[in-house]
Image: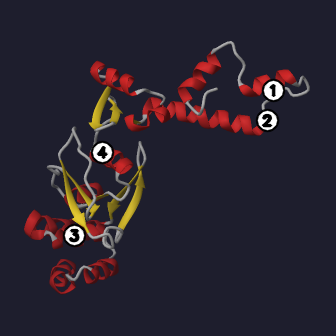
Amino acid sequence: TTNGNPLALMLAILSPHPLPCQAKASANPSRTRCDMEDLLTFVRLMLQFFQMLIKTVKGSTGARGGLARSTLYNHEADGRLVRVMPGVFADESLPLTDENLMQIISMKQPEATMNLVSALAFHGITTQIPAYLSVSLPKGTRMPKVFFSPVKAWACKPGYIRKGRKAHTGEIGKFHVTTPERTLVDCFRHRNKIGLDIFLEALHLGVQKRVFNYAEIERLSRFFHVERQITPYITTALS
């Protein structure tokens, strides 16, 4: 039995022993094909097998990837895998961009959200090159240790983190990024930490590229209690 293991399935295909559906067909000569359930199971497991080859492998769930921990560590030593976080490995050919790293982090922390300068770069409304991946997490949530790249975590109230964010799908899986409007408001809120110039440049580029929904900026700035302070900057940029 393959027990849902895609690697074991491939071995079963290559072996002289019949698959379960083949055995059923042998027992009943009138049945010459696998039934639909067998076929769907085969297709699902084949997809899992190819995902194992091209996507991130999680050591903590080795059965899903079809690789034991010892195999993962051997592949790491051989240079075929890169350890990104404890128990999480990526194929060495996978570009570890901020977007891909966010997808890997989201495997362990689904609420993690790319924000601030990293989100500005994602939306193309900054000339800054982020010095680190900026991520917001719900207060009390621990940021997984990342070996490959510097990551800065920002604690966020649970009721705040889902405001003004959008889910995206990348090479590995889903991840969240604050919307252009939420990102702009956040940059203003944290202007004393990241610099007012970051906010001003993002506002200028966003107006120039027409990426902002100003009603949404007004709604979010009111929610985060910065409407009175941010409005003069928005008015000047639009004048």
Sequence-wise, the earlier of marks 1 and 3 is: 1
Considering the numbered disc 4 on the image, is that residue within a helix, a strand or a loop?
A: helix
Any part of residue 210 in sight: no
Left of 189 or right of it: where is 50?
A: right
Any part of residue 62 in sight: yes
Q: Nearer the viewer, residue 100 or 62?
A: 62
Mark 4 to mark 1 CA distance (whole Å): 45 Å
Mark 4 to mark 2 CA distance (whole Å): 41 Å
Sequence-wise, the earlier of marks 4 and 3 is: 4
Q: Position of residue 48 (x, y in %)?
A: 54, 35
Sequence-wise, the earlier of marks 1 and 2 is: 1
Q: Position of residue 226 (x, y in %)?
A: 19, 81
Q: Which residue is mark 1?
A: 24
Mark 1 to mark 2 CA distance (whole Å): 10 Å
Quick one: label 2, few (<14), some, or many (20+) residues within 10 Å?
Answer: few
Pick the quarter of the image with the C terminus: bottom left
Q: Which residue is mark 2?
A: 35
Q: Amino acid at mark 1?
A: Lys
- As drawn, the residue found furthest toward the right would be 30
Q: Residue at x 17, y 55 (%)?
A: 127
Considering the numbered disc 3 on the image, is that residue within a helix, a strand or a loop?
A: helix
Mark 4 to mark 3 CA distance (whole Å): 21 Å
Quick one: label 4, few (<14), some, or many (20+) residues within 10 Å?
Answer: many
Q: Nearer the viewer, residue 197 or 19?
A: 19
Considering the numbered disc 1 on the image, is that residue within a helix, a strand or a loop?
A: helix
Q: Nearer the viewer, mark 1 or mark 3?
A: 1
